[in-house]
Amino acid sequence: MMEPKTILAPLLEPLTAGSAHALALNHAEALADTFDAHLEVIGIGCDRTQIGYYYAGATAVVQQETYNEARETAQAIEASVREHLKASTLRWSVETAVGQMASLAGLVTSRARFADLVVMPAPYGAGRGTEYEVTLEAALFDSHAPVMVMPEGAAAPVRPRRAVLAWNQSPEALAAIRRALPLLAGSELVNIAIIDPPRHGPERSDPGGALSQMLTRHGLRCEISVLSRTMPKVSDVLARHAADFGADMLVMGAYGHSRFREAILGGATRDVLEQPPVPVFMAR
């Protein structure tokens, strides 16, 4: 698999010490350094104007005010990124963009479609609005770019020492694992986690066996864990297993469904991202 050579970090607020955005950008920098990649940063100002909710004479005024606020946010993001990266030896670039919620997905898609990897903070949490979820969905479902979602907390290694691969025999799971191979190279151990495999599925006699063989041929040391769904949510089982295994990365497919032609994160995907236990590499 090709190593990532273009790494995109979309930022929705200015950098502050210890913030989720700062952690995500730091990880994107480490990835760019490891893979000799170009780091692209885009500062996005989100204009939340809802046309139609204002009386006719006020619409233009409100539009201009909210656009100006969004533009100022984007410019503040750019300034904080330039200050942060001014001494960096990486190849990097930063640009700004302003868009209303309705056009935000298209704005992100146009930037992410040529990126090899998108790095961003978890889309749910205190102070994070709908624009975070829209940004993630655009990268995953519209751009078809893999996304590394960073949790709150300490920095994570670029190449995980131990990684859990969520395997359910789906095309999405296999696509995520294939695209994660450059990051998995050199790992001490990868664990193929299978939750309640179907009794009559194609892998019923050897769950995860074919995947393990493929990964072993790539030089990875693998083990397989068949887990029972002993908790209400699949995400809870994965989080507990990742902790028990000592994982520092979780690889899983991104699942969603279409609603009004918009990708909406599916149950298991959304549940994991509400409180990711470790950095989550996702693709579809």
Image (spheres, rainbow, N blue to C red):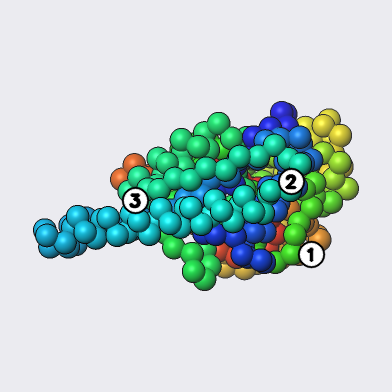
**Which mark's residue is nearer the viewer, 3 or 2?**
2
- 267 and 44: which is toward the camera: 44
Q: Where is residue 271 drawn, in percent x and y?
A: 54, 61
Residue 127 seen in this snapshot: yes
Q: Which residue is drawn at 29% across and 60% down?
A: 65
Q: In which quarter of the image is residue 146?
A: top right
The mark that comes first in sequence, 3 or 2, is 2
Please tell me whether mark 3 sits on a helix, a strand or a loop. strand
The residue under label 1 is: 244
Query: Disc 3, disc 2: CB below 8 Å?
Result: no
- Residue in the picture at 19% in, 55% down: 60
The answer for how far apart the CA atoms under marks 3 and 2 are is 32 Å
Residue 110 x %, y %: 46, 35
Q: Closer to the camera, 208 or 181? A: 181
Residue 203 vertical position relative to residue 21 in the rendered view, above or below = above
Q: Quadrant of the N terminus?
A: top right
Q: Amino acid type of disc 1?
A: Asp
Label 1 sits on a secondary structure element that is helix
Q: How crowded is mark 1: few (under 14 residues within 10 Å), some or many (20 or more)?
A: few
Residue for point 80% across, 46% down: 159
Residue 261 occupies quadrant: top left
**Residue 58 on image: x %, y %:** 16, 61
Q: Which of marks 1 and 2 is nearer the N terminus?
A: 2
Q: Residue at x 65, y 39 (%)?
A: 92
Q: In which quarter of the image is residue 238?
A: bottom right
The local secondary structure at tag 2 comes to loop
Q: Which mark identifies residue 100? A: 3
Q: Name the residue under label 2.
A: 88
